[in-house]
Image (cartoon, grey):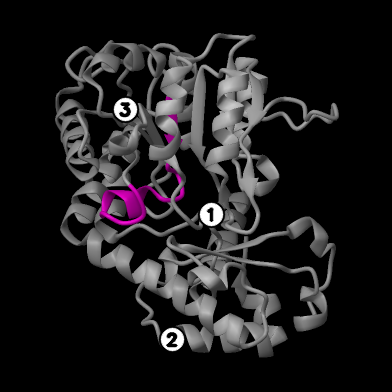
Amino acid sequence: MNKKVEEIRNILIEHNELFSKSIPLIASENITSPAVDEACNSDFSHRYAEGWVGQRVYAGCKYIDLVEDICMELAKEYFKCVHADVRPISGVVANLAMYNAFTSENNGKMLIMPIPKGGHISHAPKFTKSGMAIYGTAGTVRGLNIEYMAFDNDEMNIDPDATAKIIREFKPELVLFGGSVFLFPHPVSELSEVAKDVGANVGYDAAHVAGLIGSGYFQDPLREGADVMTLSTHKTLPGPQHGTLLSDREDLIETLRPNVFPALLSNHHLHNVAGLAVTYAEMLEFGKDYHKKVIDNAKALGQALYERGINVLMEHKNFTKSHQIVVDITNFEKTIGLGGDIERLFPFRFFFPLIHNFKEFFMVDVSRFFVFNQIFFKNFLFLS
């Protein structure tokens, strides 16, 4: 065997061994089923298909079209909408397509969640208000002028009244809900009419909570006023790393389609489309049970950690309505002996789909390891 190939193989074996003995709580990860893995490992990974189903640039797409059409139909059924584009290769690419459709290049205006409060970097400007370069996608790629929603620290959520005032004054082209730290539903229904009054479209980045939404938990943005919902497919959706763009407005379909291809994509990772189709089929079958366990586990671990002296935020609201809990780590190093520059890690955002097979009472054991076993924590508990 080629030495470098052998080296790579051994590294992968060690990686798999590490994670087989770990409790991963990284908020942007999940694992796929064997059926999804089989689809992702198909010959689709060798093929190209530009364009829409039935309108391909390349030949040989008969079966690719069949699978992609099934994927779109399953996504529409799962999210109860009229349009599903499964070509975006990530949630960020789906966001870019939304920006292309609804904002003006280089002078467009968008309102988002504050990044330090849990907004995502793909929503962000190129420079902060103080002039520091952060290279957020919306500012760097689209040149958007970004303003921030008001945030209620006590409720760990958007302040609807203060944000309504900002919308009226700023007059954005796009009001974008969603983020990376996401404990509670965002006030889409409360603010969507305000956005419409100033001529803004409403977007919702569901990357972290897409599975909860599709399975009937959390909230229903497309019925609450969102024109478009974007998502990645590997967080609360246990699918391959890919993206989806959704809308329940038929009048937007022809606007949205070309802003995916040819605007952003050539080929769109067809093997992952096949795996995603299987994922949506699985979620329609057992997503409700799966995501109920995810949320129950999040609440249970939040309670167990709180009872052991860890400052889990939002105890007065039962910690969360999603898959995440947030921990204030101001004194974390003293509590559990964690070394390093912990100030840069605030807040810790814990994630639970990967441990969905645990029962709620197992969360007590997880919390016990977390608090009392520093060796376990440092070597086997991965956090984000």
Q: Nearer the viewer, mark 3 or mark 1?
A: 3
Identify the residue position indicated by label 1 in the image.
1
The kind of residue tagged 1 is Met
Residue 292: give x, y in percent of width and height.
31, 67
Cα–Cα span, label 3 and label 1: 28 Å
Question: Relative to 361, is 382 on the left or the right?
Answer: right
Q: Nearer the viewer, residue 283 or 179?
A: 179
Q: Tell me what residue is drawn at x 28 percent, y 49 percent.
A: 214
Residue 160: give x, y in percent of width and height.
53, 41
Q: Is residue 123 above or below residue 110?
A: below
Question: Relative to 33, is 140 on the left or the right?
Answer: right
Q: Tell me what residue is drawn at x 45 percent, y 79 percent.
A: 300
Identify the residue position indicated by label 2 in the image.
362
The kind of residue tagged 3 is Arg
Identify the residue position indicated by label 3 in the image.
47
Q: Callout 1: 10 Å neighbours few (<14), some, many (20+)?
A: few
CB under 8 Å between callouts 3 and 1?
A: no
The kind of residue tagged 2 is Phe
Question: Relative to 143, is 33 on the left or the right?
Answer: left
Under tag 2, what secondary structure? helix
Q: Quadrant of residue 244?
A: top left
Cα–Cα span, label 1 and label 2: 44 Å
Q: Is residue 209 magenta?
A: yes
Q: Quadrant of residue 232?
A: top left
Looking at the rendering, the stretch of residues picked out in magenta corresponds to 202-219
